[in-house]
Amino acid sequence: MTERWQEIADRLYIRRHQSANLTIGLVLGDDHCLVVDTRASHRHAAELIRAIREVTPTPWTVVNTHAHWDHCFGNAPFAPAEIWGHVLAVKDLDETGELQRSNVLAFLPEERHEEIREVAIVPPTHTFADRATLDIGGREVHLRYFGRGHTDHDIVVHVPDVATAFVGDLIEEVPYFGDSFPLDWPVTLHRMLQDLDADTFVPGHGVAVTRQFVERQQADLASLAEYADYAYRSSGLRAVSMIDAAFPEDAQRMAFERAFQQLDGQLS
């Protein structure tokens, strides 16, 4: 994978990174720009900043699509910019930031430990609960919250003049269910599809996808949620593996575990 900017719409760029297959967004206005997610460390952020400066010298505003380490541990080097996120992203990062750091150190090779230890965890400085509109140099960008999915605070960054939306990890090649709300996720995507005028959707990892891709994944997640509910209510099925090949078995098992926790009332 070549780490370079790709202009997928007028003054709207994405940059894919080898590390975590992460996809970063950059939206240009007349005299300002918007950065969607900041990568996984100060060192990654510094590299990203150099890449942004190859495209534009203008000041930036930052948006965190959600509070997972690979999307927001690079926040600090972008200061003193405004960093936008959902109000629950601040709560999540305050409560889990150090736990996320510990978990990352447990699986990353030792040569990257110093890079993660030096991170100053900086939560969003500007928050919203439902929607917000940003003016980036005469160009409007809408921030929207449609409900719980990959986390309880995923947001969508909609650039209406080019019918494009950055959706973070609400859409992935293989969704990650570790912090998810599987029973809510398909409802959230349905709301997003109903409400947004967008043809192109940029996930937090991987290539940009079409509306048809999002519709298929929403349907797959709806089937998973329906079967999880059935399995929960059917004696003897709570340890069952999954129904079809829409998602790998390990992802399905994680989704079932989280769905059962929801049905047990363990996830508020």
Image (cartoon, rainbow, N blue to C red):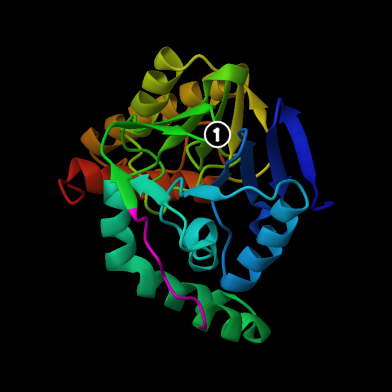
Q: Nearer the viewer, residue 73 or 241?
A: 73
**Residue 121 is a magenta residue:** yes
Prevailing secondary structure of the magenta residues: loop
Residue shown at 58% from the left, 84% from the top: 113
Give the magenta range.
118-125
**Residue 12 is a magenta residue:** no
Horizontally, residue 246 falls left or right of residue 157, namely right
Horizontally, residue 44 falls left or right of residue 227, namely right
Residue sticking out furthest to the right: 2
Quadrant of the image occupied by residue 163: top right
Mark 1 crowdedness (10 Å alpha carbons): few <14, some 14-19, many ≥20: some
Residue 66, x across and y down, in percent: 42, 49
Residue 24, x across and y down, in percent: 63, 47
Q: Nearer the viewer, residue 17 or 128?
A: 128
Asked whether residue 17 appears in the rendered view, the answer is no
| Relative vertical location of residue 65 with respect to residue 188 in this rendering, above or below | below
Q: Write down the residue under mark 1.
A: 137
Quadrant of the image occupied by residue 222: top left
Residue shown at 37% from the left, 44% from the top: 256
Q: What residue type is labelled 1?
A: Gly
Residue shown at 41% from the left, 55% from the top: 67
Residue sticking out furthest to the front: 31
| Relative vertical location of residue 188 with respect to residue 265 in this rendering, above or below | above
Residue 69, x across and y down, in percent: 48, 63
- Element under label 1? loop
